[in-house]
Image: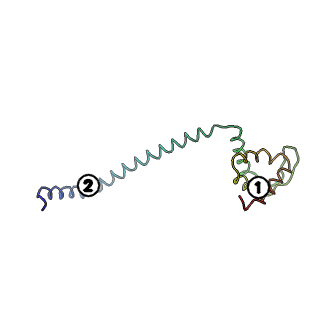
Amino acid sequence: MESLTKILLKNGVRGMLSENESYFKENIVQTLSFKLNASIQEATLALSENLLVSESTTPETQSLKNFVIFLESFKPGKFKFKDDSIINITESDIESIKKLFEGLNTKNRLQLTKDIFKNPTEFKQHIEFSKSAKGLL
């Protein structure tokens, strides 16, 4: 049998909790919110520091960034190559290049950015390769 003191203490605590239940719930939620926000800020800070480190621009990374920007903004039509020749590039050509680019590792992506716009022959070879490798990439 429980002692009278223990019973009164339990009932008193229960009574206090029921009277102040909303206060305790809000406090717990607020405390958890602060902890969650602090964790998110910490993770965001660590991520931004990592990005700053990885953002150190080398000619290679800048070349890749420029190529991605170019692919995203490129429109079908006439295109002038480094050797001054001009050909018509279609939407499917652009999509093929994008798919090819996505399937390559960094080393091969860099090689692609150097080679593909040298002349129409290089370009057509890359397009043919990307279309033939469509199921593999």
Q: Quadrant of the N terminus?
A: bottom left
Question: For mark 1, does the 10 Å Cα neighbourhood hold few (<14), some (14 to 19), or many (20 or more) residues?
Answer: some
Give the residue furthest to the right.
85
Residue 134: x %, y % from top left = 74, 60
From the viewer's side, name the closer residue of 72 and 106.
Answer: 106
Residue for point 83% across, 45% down: 118
Q: Which residue is mark 2?
A: 20
From the viewer's side, name the closer residue of 23 and 31.
Answer: 31
Residue for point 30% across, 53% down: 24
Is 110 on the left or on the right of 21, as rendered? right
Q: Quadrant of residue 98?
A: bottom right
Amino acid type at mark 2: Asn
Question: For mark 2, does the 10 Å Cα neighbourhood hold few (<14), some (14 to 19), or many (20 or more) residues?
Answer: few
Q: Quadrant of the C terminus?
A: bottom right
Disc 2/disc 1 C-alpha distance (Å) = 65 Å
Is 92 on the left or on the right of 42, as rendered? right
63 to 15, vertically: above or below: above
Residue 58: x %, y % from top left = 68, 37
6 to 82, vertically: above or below: below
Mark 1: secondary structure: helix
Residue for point 80% across, 46% down: 115
Residue 28: x %, y % from top left = 34, 52
Q: Which residue is mark 1?
A: 94
Is 62 on the left or on the right of 90, as rendered? left
How is colour applied across the structure in the image? Answer: rainbow
Give the residue furthest to the left.
4
Residue 47: x %, y % from top left = 54, 43
Label 2 close to label 1 by CB (< 8 Å):
no
Amino acid type at mark 1: Ile
Mark 2: secondary structure: loop
Residue for point 76% across, 55% down: 94
Circle 2 or circle 1, nearest the eye: 1
